[in-house]
Image (tube, grey):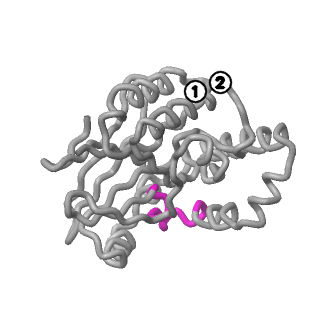
C-alpha cells in the first residue's frame, strides 16, 4: 500500500505548468495509492464553491475520477483555500478533514495539519486567521456577489505578498516549542505538514517532523509513504 501527501500547489491560471503537473500526478501516480492527502493550499485562493473556471473544472474532474476509481482523497484546508466547502466535497468525493487529523500509517500514529497554526510567532497572521475563520465573517463574505469576492481576494493576495517580504524569515516557520506541545497533545510520533514551503525531514526531540514543499513549474513535492518508510518522489 502507498499513501501520497502533497500541499502548497497554489494552483492558478497564471501558472498552467503546475496545474499540468497536478493532473499528471492524479492520472499516473495517485491511482496506484491507497489514499491521497492534500494538506492545504491546493488553490492559490478560494472564494467560494460557486466559483467556476476551466482550471477549477479540470481539478474537480481529476479528483472525481480518482475517488470514483476507489482511491480515497482527503483535504485539510490551508490559509489560502479555507473556504473550500461541502459542495466541492460532494462534487468530487474528496473528504474534508479538520485542522488537525491523526491517522495510522503502518502502525505509526501520525498527526496531519496544514502548518499555519504552528507558526505562532507570526502574531499578525494569527490575528488575521482568527478573524477569517469566524463562521459569521465567512457567511457574510460568501453572501457577497462573486465579482466583489474576486476583487477582495486579489487585494488580500497583493497585501499578503507585500507583508511576506517585510517579515523576518524565522517568524514564518513553526514555533518549535508549540509544535512539540501540539504533537504531544495528540500523542503521535510523526507530524506531516506544509505551509512553510521548506521541504525537509526533521528529527525533533521525541518525534519526526516532515515538511512538504511547495510546487513549482518544474518540480512537484510529493511525499510517498509505504511499508518501507517515507521519501520524497
**Residues in magenta, as a range:** 114-125
As rendered, which of 130 and 120 lies closer to the eye? 130
Seen at 50% across and 26% down, the residue is 19
Return the mark for residue 226.
none
Seen at 34% across and 62% down, the residue is 103
Element under label 2?
Answer: helix
The crowding category of the residue bearing disc 2, from other C-alpha atoms within 10 Å (few below 14, some 14 to 19, many at least 20), is: few
Residue 95 rendering spot, x and y as whole percentages: 51, 52
As drawn, is 75 to the left or to the right of 133? left
Question: Vertically, is 217 above or below 187?
Answer: above
As rendered, which of 101 and 14 lies closer to the eye? 101
Element under label 1?
Answer: helix
Is 130 magenta? The answer is no
Q: Which residue is mark 1?
A: 58
Question: Vertically, is 22 above or below 108?
Answer: above
Total numbered labels placed on residues in the image: 2
Is 118 magenta? The answer is yes
Seen at 30% across and 46% down, the residue is 3
Would you say residue 162 is visible in this rendering? no
Residue 87 rendering spot, x and y as whole percentages: 67, 48
As rendered, which of 39 and 227 lies closer to the eye? 227
Residue 161 rendering spot, x and y as whole percentages: 60, 42
Q: Which residue is mark 2?
A: 54
As drawn, is 40 to the left or to the right of 177? right
Q: Quadrant of the N terminus?
A: top left
Label 1 close to label 2 by CB (< 8 Å): yes
As drawn, is 146 to the left or to the right of 135? right
Amino acid at each position: 500500500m502507498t499513501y501520497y501527501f502533497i500541499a502548497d500547489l497554489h494552483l492558478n491560471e497564471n501558472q498552467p505548468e503546475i496545474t499540468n503537473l497536478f493532473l499528471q500526478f492524479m492520472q499516473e501516480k495517485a491511482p496506484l495509492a491507497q489514499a491521497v492527502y492534500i494538506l492545504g493550499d491546493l488553490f492559490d485562493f478560494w472564494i467560494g464553491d460557486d466559483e467556476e473556471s476551466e482550471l477549477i473544472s479540470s481539478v474537480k474532474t481529476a479528483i472525481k475520477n480518482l475517488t470514483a476509481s476507489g482511491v480515497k482523497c482527503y483535504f485539510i484546508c490551508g490559509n489560502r483555500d479555507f473556504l473550500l466547502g461541502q459542495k466541492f466535497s460532494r462534487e468530487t468525493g474528496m473528504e474534508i478533514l479538520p485542522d488537525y487529523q491523526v491517522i495510522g500509517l503502518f502502525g505509526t500514529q501520525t498527526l496531519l495539519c496544514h502548518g499555519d497554526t504552528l507558526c505562532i510567532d507570526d502574531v499578525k497572521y494569527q490575528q488575521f486567521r482568527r478573524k477569517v475563520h469566524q463562521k459569521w465573517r465567512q457567511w457574510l463574505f460568501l453572501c457577497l456577489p462573486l465579482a466583489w469576492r474576486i476583487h477582495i481576494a486579489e487585494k488580500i493576495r497583493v497585501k499578503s505578498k507585500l507583508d511576506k517580504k517585510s517579515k523576518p524569515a524565522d517568524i514564518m516557520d513553526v514555533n518549535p516549542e508549540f509544535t512539540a506541545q501540539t504533537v504531544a497533545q495528540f500523542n503521535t510520533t510523526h507530524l506531516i505538514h506544509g505551509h512553510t514551503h521548506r521541504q525537509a525531514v526533521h528529527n525533533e526531540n521525541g518525534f519526526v517532523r516532515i515538511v512538504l514543499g511547495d510546487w513549482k513549474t518544474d518540480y512537484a513535492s510529493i511525499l510517498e509513504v509505504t511499508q518501507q518508510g517515507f521519501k520524497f518522489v
